[in-house]
Amino acid sequence: MLDSQTTELINKAIDGQLESDEEATLATLLSRDNEARTLFEQLSAMITLIEAQPPETAPRDISEAVRARLMSPGSEIVTIGAALNRKSTKKQRAIPAFFALAASMMIAVGIVTISPITDDDADLVGTLARPTAADQAPVLNELIYLVNNGRWAIEIDIKRSVPFELTLRSEDQMGSHNPIFSNIDTEDLQITQLASGIKLSGQGPVNTTFFITDDHSPSIRPSLTGSLSLGNRTLSGRITVTGN
Amino acid sequence: MTEDEEHILIEQCKKGDINAYTLLVKEYQNTIFNCAWRIVLNREDAADITQSAFLKLFERIETFDSNRKFFSWMYRIAINEALDHKRRRRTFDEFDEEKHSSDNRAPDASLEDEELKATIAACLRRLPDDARVVITLKHFSGLSYNEIGEILEIPERTVKSRLYSARQKMKNLLPVSIIQRA
């Protein structure tokens, strides 16, 4: 049985890590100790064999598969890395009870409000989420957060011919459940995958609905921050569900 | 790719640039695939793991500290992905060496090369996970003790002791007739 110092010297020699004085010590050891010499020879031979193994080639182009997955819209599903905020509340548990109602009153179920972060955006509160008066020309008619067959849906309904951009990011960067965006209409919306979210852009008028879901807990409300740019106006802030 | 080029690409990735990320994946996909293959020893599984690891990397790239080494972070995520995969597989699929080695054959390899490759794979398969990982990083990926320590987040002395022990186990598993070929 070899002592640990000898074993260490042999391993250091194999890795080319010996100091000059250690080289002399090992040489002496190997000349006197058959067991040490056998171990050194066998380990050296084994490492030579292992390191001579040619690298494997991947069976397919993984970069293209990754790219396709990141670019995939609609039915192909876009997954973002940030997780849903899964704080449980009484409201969340009540959600399944109004699924049936939601099916018949989709537009009335809930409204996404983008709460402004800065005062500069104060004049946009509510107006972007919902027109405040009947005679007011709707810029963004409704940005609706609703429930549709267990999926959370966001409806974008822009009446005017203006460019728009909607960015959604999860607030929770560390969770293990990923929000999945689906049913994105790529004829109306251009999709840019962000590391923690998604950017949808296009040109009004547009009326389209897409979905956010979580594989494990579809009834949990995602907690998102976001920004909406319409023409030359931008509103940024936390997105919350304010409807019942 | 130089470190500066890699740094620029990473910064572009943090802004959501998928084209930049594709270039990073192209650069490292074979490295990560090979590492994953040595851990799970199945080509299709290794490809899936590589793809999954790169998707996770992109999801988390905003959190990547640019002062750290990208490759260490990349390897760590890939190794965790491979080990998770291996554990999941083990829970509902008792390992069948014949089944899992049959798809690893390269079409143009000689019988002797194939026999050696299969024997090494069989030995790796019988090693504990930590030994398999350290052998893979040192001898198949060619990394230094320091780099392995960064990836596994363990001190260099622990890398050495794990490696020495893993080599001993591997030698005991490898038939003498194979070792003598070298």
Image (spheres, coloured by chain):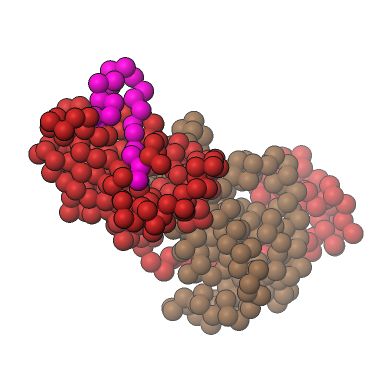
Of all residues, the one furthest to the top in this rendering is: A119
Q: Residue at x 36, y 60 (%)?
A: A65
Asked whether A94 or A89 is in front, the reply is A94
Q: Residue at x 59, y 44 (%)?
A: B151
Q: Locate residue A77: give its quadrant.
A: bottom left
In the rendered image, the vertical position of residue B84 relative to residue A170, given as above or below: below
- Is any part of residue A155 visible from this angle? yes
Q: Position of residue B142 (x, y in %)?
A: 56, 52
Q: Residue at x 54, y 42 (%)?
A: A90
Question: Magenta part of the protein: which range?
Answer: A109-128
Q: Colour of chain A?
A: red
In the rendered image, the vertical position of residue A113 relative to residue A146, given as above or below: above
Q: Locate residue B122: give its quadrant.
A: bottom right
Q: Is residue A109 left or right of residue A175?
A: left
Q: Is residue A133 left or right of residue A121?
A: left
> The C terminus of chain B appears in which quarter of the rendering?
bottom right
Q: Position of residue A182 (x, y in %)?
A: 33, 55
Asked whether B104 or B44 is in front, the reply is B44
Asked whether A33 or B124 is in front, the reply is B124
> The N terminus of chain B appears in which quarter of the rendering?
top left
Q: Position of residue B166 (x, y in %)?
A: 72, 58
Q: Colour of chain B?
A: brown
- Residue A120 magenta-highlighted: yes
Asked whether B52 or A144 is in front, the reply is A144
